[in-house]
Amino acid sequence: MPSRTPSRAGFFALAFALLALFGASPARAADDDSVRTILAQLRDADFDGKTEMIEKLVALDHPRIATILKALSDSRLYYQEEGDRVVIGLGDAADIAIEDAVSGAALGQVGKRDLDRITANNRLRSLIEDRLASLGLASADPRQRKAAVEAFLRNPDPAGAERLRARLAVETDSGIKELLWLALALADLASDDATVRAKAATALGGRMETEIRGPLARMAAEDGDPAAKEAARIALARTEFRLQMLGWAETLFFGLSLGSVLILAAIGLAVTFGVMGVINMAHGELMMLGAYTTWLTQQWLPVNWSLPVAVPLAFLVAALVGIAIERGIIRFLYGRPLETLLATFGVSLILQQAVRSIFSPLNRSVATPDWMSGTILLGPLEVTLNRLVILGFCIAVFALLWLALQRTRLGLEVRAVAQNRAMARAMGVRSARVDALTFGLGSGIAGVAGVALSQLTNVGPNLGQSYIVDSFMVVVFGGVGNLWGTMVAGLSLGVANKLLEPWSGAVLAKILVLVFLILFIQKRPRGLFPQRGRAAEV
Amino acid sequence: MSELISELDAAGMHPPVGPVDATHGILLYLEGVSVSFDGFKAIDNLSLYIGDGELRCIIGPNGAGKTTMMDIITGKTKPDAGRVFFGQTIDLLKLDEPAIARVGIGRKFQRPTVIEPLTVLENLELAMSGAKRLRGLMTTRLSGEERDRIAAVLDRIGLTEHGGRLAGILAHGQKQWLEIGMLLMQEPRLLLVDEPVAGMTPAEMDRTAELLRSLAGSHSVVVVEHDMGFVRSIADRVTVLHQGRVLAEGRLDELQEDPTVIEVYLGAGDAYH
Amino acid sequence: MRLPPWLLSDRAGLVLLAILAIIGVGVPVLNLLAPPDHPLHLTAYTVTLLGKYLCYALLAVAVDLVWGYMGILSLGHAAFFALGGYCFGMYLMRQIGTRGVYGDPVLPDFMVFLNWQELPWYWHGFDLFWFAAVMVLVVPGLLAFVFGWFAFRSRVSGVYLSIITQALTYALMLAFFRNEMGFGGNNGLTDFKDALGFPLQADGARIVLFVLSTLALAGGYLACRWLVSTRLGRVLVAIRDSEDRARFLGYRVEKVKALVFTFSAMLAGVAGALYVPQVGIINPGEFAPLNSIEAVIWVAVGGRGTLVGAVVGAVLINYAKTWLTGALPEVWLFALGGLFVMVTLLLPYGLIGLLRRREATA
């Protein structure tokens, strides 16, 4: 790890060296003269020298330090030859008011020409900013205190360690306490005492911040004391382990996210293909219609409101188109699955071209609402909000569908017709109506899936095609006619895909998953969770 | 051995000598066979023995396991437990469907299954044993012997005049006979016949009964049937299946007196289907 | 010469063969002998276009053999077509030699471009015509055999089989898009120069390719017609209409299926190999699932289970495609989609079925 951020590591080395130099001596109230002495040196020093002087100033416990540093950072610190003193300019005119840098006494107006500016560069300015922040440690405002510790972590301050230790004793805010502890442990890593270093290393093991991993790695590589070195190595190993776990968690999340998309794409098929046995190659295009419905909704409504409206609308649009397909074509082809496949494929071509002719062949961009953009922290894991929302959405759709099939009259009839059409009819189920509604339900879910897809990919006429093979594989893998199977299959395929990706690359991962599926289906033609008995003989 | 054999002999053919060893007079053994689907025991510790040359009828209410039993014998379903032997030596559980067909077991399905776009002749040609190897299949011609064999079977099933017609346009009963004819072309030792007279007119039934009776002796024949009249007309021995096991076995008139049989089967109102 | 009875009874097939004989002779004559301003003159473009149709027709025959006679709806036959095409394309690439942009005597341009140092092992031998010609049969055949053997042995059938054949071609498409595969990635194989020393762009080569396509189609048709006329053909029909019946008759259904599927894939491979030099390019787009399904619809339109119908459908639809994508590009997909729906709903036996019914009622 250290090799990746050499400049930062170098800077830390310098800072730690200084820390070692000064950190041991206790801070004490300084008199004006020592400040003046340092200021005099500051005037002539080059930038490296200035860095040193700034650290010296910060180490002095003097009430004017913050003002002086601020002035230096703002290029308002001058040397006045007449009087041989360092002053602070107030204002930016040709004639400005000045005050003594150390005492703060007003010294009247002088011409700028009589002053010699003490220059600072950006590096010095950022150093000053951090030092000023760390001086805010005593502030009553917890945010300022936090900023002070963070400034220290970014850019450890030789004198700061003592201040931090003092603060840790009285700090009440647990977050800041933790941060303080961290900062101190980090400072201890540079201690002269090997036992202190080893203890600090052990304490820091498992922390994933780069600011900590850098020094630890260096210590594990270079520390002269074998015990300390070993402690650093173990600490690093713990960190690596946690990083790895985090990596796995991240992969898992991406896998689940992909899985949720697969499930959304496949779940409608699980109804039309799985429950009814109808193979609908236009399923992908129904998703596409859902995505275009989302786009259209956004033309009329503000983006933030569009999705809640688009979901029912997309369901309706896709369901109606689906019912039209069922009534117009599929019902004449029941019992002839291969013909159904061909006819619905024709429908998919027509829908694609229709969208191309109406909306243009170009992709439409669907905006993401504010409440779905950005990222959110789940513990140490940073996840994109839209993927999280879609994961939740997928679960909701699944749950609703499950309830619809298990708890409603239509669901009962659907299952009855699926199991034994003749018997269901004999019991008074109007099977034609049930067929149409079931197909409408499956199609509507495809439309809803399209809304979700519009948040992840480009919305174009080819949207459906890219999902059709995948979604059939999910249904078949899970076991036709088994909703839970579809869920498990979708999630596991999603995760498998993402697990393979870092090793093989995205395209190869997809190919491998496909090949696996092809082999799997040959081994278990009825999927993971097959239905058995006579009903399964499609 | 009777008619068919002599007919075939006359045509210069011999019945399959094969490795079937029925020296103890039993051709088919089912012992302790069980199979369940999702917890439902379709066949439950079933034991059944079919004698060489016997004509056996199997009856039982719907769901008694008749078709599942046929599936097990022909290799379509593998049982969870039990042994199924063809003769003394052939373990049917180790064979798949084509192999079982080749050792000499023919099966007629419940629904008549003939290949409708082919002619009656072609259906019989398709079923002809000895043509199953690839080399035998790569020909468009029939040899003289083959022609004679087909003619003999055509005559036996009474379809001689329909040889050139498409199987799809035959009457229902004729399709059933054609399917039995296809079985005969396989030269099996054992015929499993599932509901041969479903949907037949009484006259057709009589002819079918005659056909099946003529097969017994040279073949073992197992007939699953619902029609009691038909069963009475053909069977010497009848086995009653119930809930996957043998409930009773014997002559039909004896069974009809048996109170348990009356209760589960005849009493169920399912006897005359 | 007496025709064997199986051919003699196939009237439609005889008509088809006669037409193939006529165009096999007539097209070259009209191209070479009729002067360019003569109304009957056929341009080289037209000859190549016709040759392309014939290749598609051979693919359709291959699809019809497995779908029409054996009931296997393969949605992946374009994969075998493309593999045959790639095999021959590899030969053509190797023939370019130093005439490529980078002038490497061994490596094709795209490999030089990718900084490859040596030829991948699977490119070896493709500089030999006979080797490539054998591979045109072996590669699609082997894939079909292995795939079919596993699929049929586990009794994957019906729509499940259709879906996994589609997944197969889809996976191959993704794979061939990858540069690392060593088949030119996106761009595929192109810029061919010559075959067996004859420049492909020359009129003579186009004529030869056209005649070869005619012969291949005629040969493929005859082979399939003979096959379905044998006892094996009846077994195929039995498998299509009642797989269980065939099995209980003692046929090893999976073996028969795997064999015929393999043979069909080889035919498709030959069609692809003839197609590539005529169009001058092969790229992963040929694996697209849509291509396979289009081939199926050619067969459906012509009439499945007739072989002749496959040829008729392939030529008619591709002619319509050429014409429509030129004149009314927007309409083409509507027309194709509508065709899928109409044929399955209204014309289950295709055009040939329609003709036969006319004949039967007349």
Image (cartoon, rainbow, N blue to C red):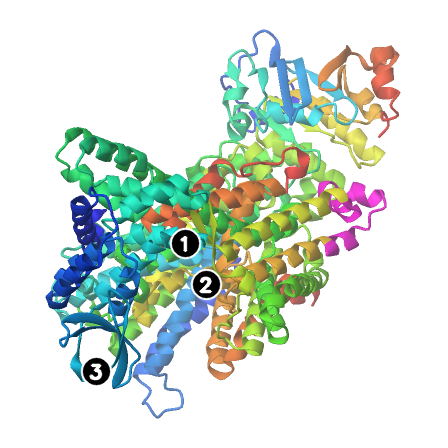
- Check disc 3 and report the residue beneath it: A112
The answer, for residue C245, to whether it is visible in the render is yes
- Check disc 1 and report the residue beneath it: A139
Q: Quadrant of residue A32?
A: bottom left
Image quadrant containing the N terminus of chain B: top right
Image quadrant containing the C terminus of chain B: top right
The answer, for residue B170, to whether it is visible in the render is no
The residue shown at (60%, 43%) is A480
Left or right of A184 on screen, residue B123 = right
Amino acid type, mark 1: Ser
| Circle 2/circle 1 CB separation < 8 Å | no
Q: How many marks?
A: 3
- Residue toward you, C35 or C342: C342
- Check disc 2 and report the residue beneath it: C291
Residue range highlighted in magenta: A408-437
- Residue toward you, A198 or A2: A198
Q: CA distance from mark 2 to mark 1?
A: 72 Å
Q: CA distance from mark 1 to mark 3?
A: 35 Å
- Residue toward you, A256 or C208: A256
Give SS at disc 3: helix
The residue shown at (20%, 43%) is A25
Residue A417: within the magenta?
yes
Predominant SS of the magenta segment: helix
- Residue toward you, A511 or A393: A393
Mark 1 chain: A
- Mark 1 nearby-residue class (10 Å; few <14, some 14–19, many ≥20): few
Residue C287: within the magenta?
no
Give SS at disc 1: loop
Query: Where residue B145 appears, x then y in whole percent?
Result: 52, 34
